[in-house]
Amino acid sequence: MTTSYDTAAAILPLVGGPANITSVAHCMTRLRLGLADRSLVDEEALRAVPGVLGVVDDDTYQIVLGPGVVARVTSDFEALLTSAGQLTVKGAELKAARKARNATPGKLLLRRLANIFVPLIPALIGCGILAGVNGLLLNLGWLPGLTPALTTLAAAFMSLIAVFVGHNTAKEFGGTPVLGGAVAAVVVYPGVAKVTAFGVTLAPGQGGVLGALTAALLGTYVEKYCRRRMPGTLDVLLTPTLTVLIAGLATLYGLMYAAGEISAAIGTAANWLLSTTGAFAGLVLGGLFLPLVMLGLHQALIPIHTTLIEQQGHTVLLPILAMAGAGQVGAALAVYVRLRHDTSLRTTIRSALPAGLLGVGEPLIYGVSLPLGRPFLTACVGGAAGGAFVGGFAMLGDQVGATAIGPSGWALFPLLAGNGGLWWTAAIYAGGLLTGYAVGFVTTYAFGLRSLPSPSPAE
């Protein structure tokens, strides 16, 4: 059995060795490496490493390993680099130069949003699953003595998520993380109910994650301003005091109200979109999500998902967007059936398909559909059909939501929530997946491949 250390040790020489590594990070599914010279990468051998599901050459060199696995491999990879004495000052300089070349305002914003919210996803998943289990127990009337405890465990993190967002925001923008958390904590402190702003009494949690993000961001700029101007003897006392005071008052008497209005508008807009144009909205969202993932633009949706979860208990957008993965699976199955003489491609599909069924779509995108061209487009058609299916039920009043972000495909079932009951919600989501599989398969089989390759003489 291949261990995470084995995988890390196999990857290291194939990306140019320790001397070629300038940075190491990971997200939910990918090991992200900064490389001094990308020509040293042996991509064909890298794709063949057991456990590697695909590679993506972007602003960082990204190796797709899958949820859970990536964190263990990254840890072992960093340990190998530490023992080799790498990630030197020169490496940091190369990383900074590469970042500067790729730091368009849009990319930089998305990267920073991801750095703020992606670390929160494991807690969102864990608490979301507990909320789903608790809801099932309540519906069945089982274990009544345990459900209050599960309710507490599931809700505790969400009640304080603003603090974690504030901490990560300050960390990302160069402030002191604990000061970011302290300023953001104002948003959820029960005592704000005694404060009146714009003639309205504030409510704890008003503004949610958006209020926390903007409060911590303002606090970071206040802190930096003070540190540049304070004498060293006063800095340790006055800078944190002024940061909390100025940013905290601005949060109470402006940001919470404004962010609350924006958060309410996001929830209202999402509900209106699905209740009035559900099928069409689902078609558009499901059809466009694969290109968004390919370009990395899907990160911009994380704050919206988080806001909806905090506000309504679930995000109605994620199950629709998850249909893109279903279209991708259907397209890959059609390629597998039609290109029966392409042993290499069929092997890639067999290894990537389980990950695709569980919502990790990058191996199929970069290993199958995108290189072939047309199957990527027909996969989008399958995603659009699945999205339209789920969106159509939303028009009828049966909304399907997810209590956490991160998983999709079959892995989203434990996180489903809706107003029609657990089983009906799961049935609608399953119907969307089956629709995505079927339409992705049929359109790819019929239109996704120009012609069948001729079999070799050996075959």
Image (cartoon, rainbow, N blue to C red):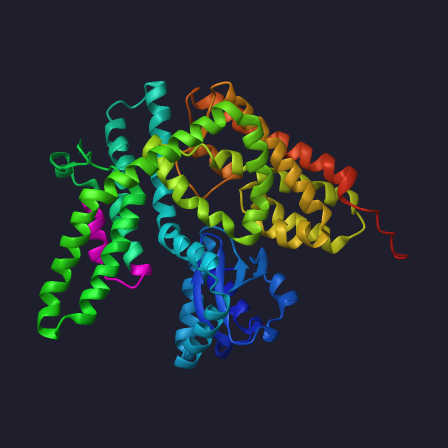
| Residue sitting nearer the eye, 141 or 114 | 114
Residue 221 rendering spot, x and y as whole percentages = 25, 60
**Residue 418 drawn above or below residue 62:** above
Identified at 10% across, 64% down, the residue is 238
Identified at 17% across, 49% down, the residue is 248
Instruction: Give left or right: position of 401 versus 326.
Output: left
Q: Quadrant of residue 256?
A: top left
Instruction: Give left or right: position of 456 versus 354.
Output: right
Residue 24 rendering spot, x and y as whole percentages = 44, 67
The extreme right residue here reads 457
Magenta stretch: residue 176 in it?
yes
Can see residue 159?
no
| Residue sitting nearer the eye, 132 or 448 | 448
Identified at 53% across, 38% down, the residue is 322
**Residue 395 drawn above or below residue 301:** above
The extreme front residue here reads 198
**Dominant secondary structure, magenta:** helix
**Residue extent of the magenta highlight:** 171-186
Can see residue 237?
yes
**Residue 293 drawn above or below residue 275:** below
Q: How many marks?
A: 0
Residue 66 rendering spot, x and y as whole percentages = 51, 52
Magenta stretch: residue 316 in it?
no
Instruction: Give left or right: position of 407 versus 309.
Output: right
Residue 48 rendering spot, x and y as whole percentages = 63, 62
Identified at 56% across, 43% down, the residue is 289
